[in-house]
Image (spheres, grey):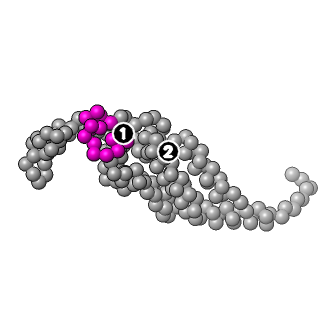
Amino acid sequence: MTGTTMEYDHSPALELLDKLQEKLDDLSPALGDIGEYLTNAHEERFKQQVAPDGTPWAPLSPSYQRTKAKNKNRILVLNGYMEKSYRYQVSDNELNFGTNNPNAAHHHFGTKPYTIKPKSKKALAFGGVVVKKVNHPGLKARPLIGVSEADNEEILQLLSEHLDL
């Protein structure tokens, strides 16, 4: 370019860039909102008894349903502990989301067949019968944690709202 001089007052642009930098330095408010959203979304899916992709969980086996003490028609619900076990933690611009229930992984991924033996007694009461061991057929996978396409859209919306300058 020859012979042309142009002046540009860049202070408004710098102000916006400063605001953007401030927001990017501390993502914890946005991550906290995402954690709350994921908690609510997962609890709702638990009530609907579906995986994150919307597919219904595998039904209870008829034998377990007959012997289940309460909540006979609810999958993965006996006392309601797992349903309310979703947690999130925000630290160092990172969001960790999951469950603090030690049995959740077995249900999420399923298990191979296994044997149950008594730990402190000589026998087990299983299905109204006293036995020395139970050959369990394994647990069917019932995915508990994941992000759906609708979740992705909501997360992007939450991030957009937090970056709104």
In the image, taking residue 32 as reference, residue 123 lies left or right, namely left
Q: Which mark is residue 147?
A: 2
Marked residue nearer the N-terminal end (2 or 1): 1
Give the residue drawn at x 87%, y 62%.
7
Mark pair 2, 1: CA separation: 26 Å
Q: Which residues are the magenta region?
A: 60-74
Neighbours of disc 2 within 10 Å: few (<14), some (14-19), many (20+): some
Neighbours of disc 1 within 10 Å: few (<14), some (14-19), many (20+): few
Which quadrant of the figure contains the C terminus?
bottom right
Give the residue drawn at x 88%, y 59%.
6
Q: Which image quarter: residue 26?
A: bottom right
Q: What is the x, y in percent for residue 136?
A: 21, 38
In the image, taking residue 23 as reference, residue 72 lies left or right, namely left
The residue nearer to you, when weighing 97 against 135, is: 135
Instruction: List the residue tagged with mark 1.
Output: 73
Which amino acid, by three-letter code, is at mark 2?
A: Val
Secondary structure mostly taken by the magenta-highlighted segment of the chain:
loop
